[in-house]
Amino acid sequence: MFFTYFLIATFATILGSLAGLGGGVIIKPILDTLGHYDLSTVGVLSSITVFSMALVSTFKQIKSGFKIEINMVLLSLGSILGGGIGETIFDFFLTLFVDQSTAKGIQALIIALLLLVVLFKNKLPKYHIQNNLIIFMVGIVLGAIAAFLGIGGGPINVAVLIMFFSFSTKNAAISSIFIILLSQLSKILLIMLTTGFSSYNLNMLPFMVIGGISGGFIGASLNKKLKNKQIEKIFNISVISIILLNIYNVYISF
């Protein structure tokens, strides 16, 4: 089972680092389908794995010449605040259900609907937002959604960067990972400073973190080598696959 979780983390974070998906949007539905852990533990496993990937990937991209623009900093700062808000909403959300499978199904349905919108990102109107307050507020929303759904926010980040800031898919993918890095850091620190990690079953975490680090290196290297159209195709195929997996999770949850 250890090797299975290592492979899941590696595969998810290669795609996450390469196409800006983050990895959490892949890890969460797969772990939900396996059903070995409760929602809270899945969220923690996903967040720490994705954080390790984002740390490695961002470092590698900066070393290769990637420059962090001011709007990325504002979005990231907003996502840090949003991450805390999203985690608080998630904790309250769990108290509403006696059976976590219902909560799991609702999360899967929201993810599937959001990803359907993401899939048609290139057909939606494009903007170039420059107002710093609006950029910060967008970051809060992104961070809150990512933390609440436990997915890191990758594909949603990419879609927002393309639609609201006119990024190419390739640049959006790189920038998305930087946003994910800080939003997941805020979530991890919030857990550390409040409930702590003792209540979670994290036996698989070391293997998933190793997979996340490996995926970060491999994905960032592939991102440099592939063209924008190739990354766009990988992104779309991945999103369609994740939508289908979440629809399956909705089906088995109700």
Image (cartoon, grey):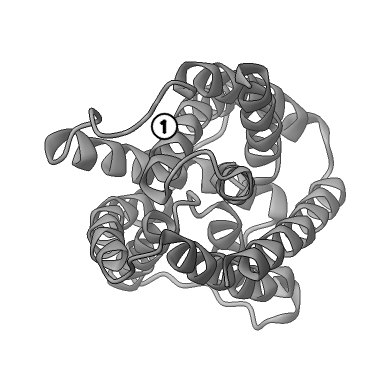
Q: Give the quadrant of residue 196.
A: top left
Locate residue 46, reporting x and y percent. Answer: 48, 39
Q: Which residue is drawn at 13% across and 41% down?
A: 194
Residue 242's place in the image compared with 19, above or below, is: below
Looking at the picture, tell me which residue is in the foreground, 32 or 119: 32
Q: In this view, does 158 lie to the left or right of 69?
A: right
Q: How crowded is mark 1: few (under 14 residues within 10 Å), some or many (20 or more)?
A: many
Give the amino acid at mark 1: Ile
In the image, residue 177 lies at what x, y percent? 52, 41
Q: Which of the pair 62/103 is nearer the observer?
A: 103
**Quadrant position of residue 217:** top right
Tell me the element at label 1. Answer: helix
Evaluate whether residue 165 shows in this view.
Answer: no
Give the image location of residue 167, x and y in percent. Answer: 62, 59
Residue beneath the point at 56% across and 52% down? 154
Kindly identify which residue carries mark 1: 48
Q: Residue 220: image x %, image y %?
A: 66, 29
The residue located at (13%, 36%) in the rendering is: 193
Q: In this view, does 126 lie above or below 147?
A: below
Instruction: Name the one closer to the observer, 210 or 28.
Output: 28
Residue at the location (42% across, 50% down)? 39
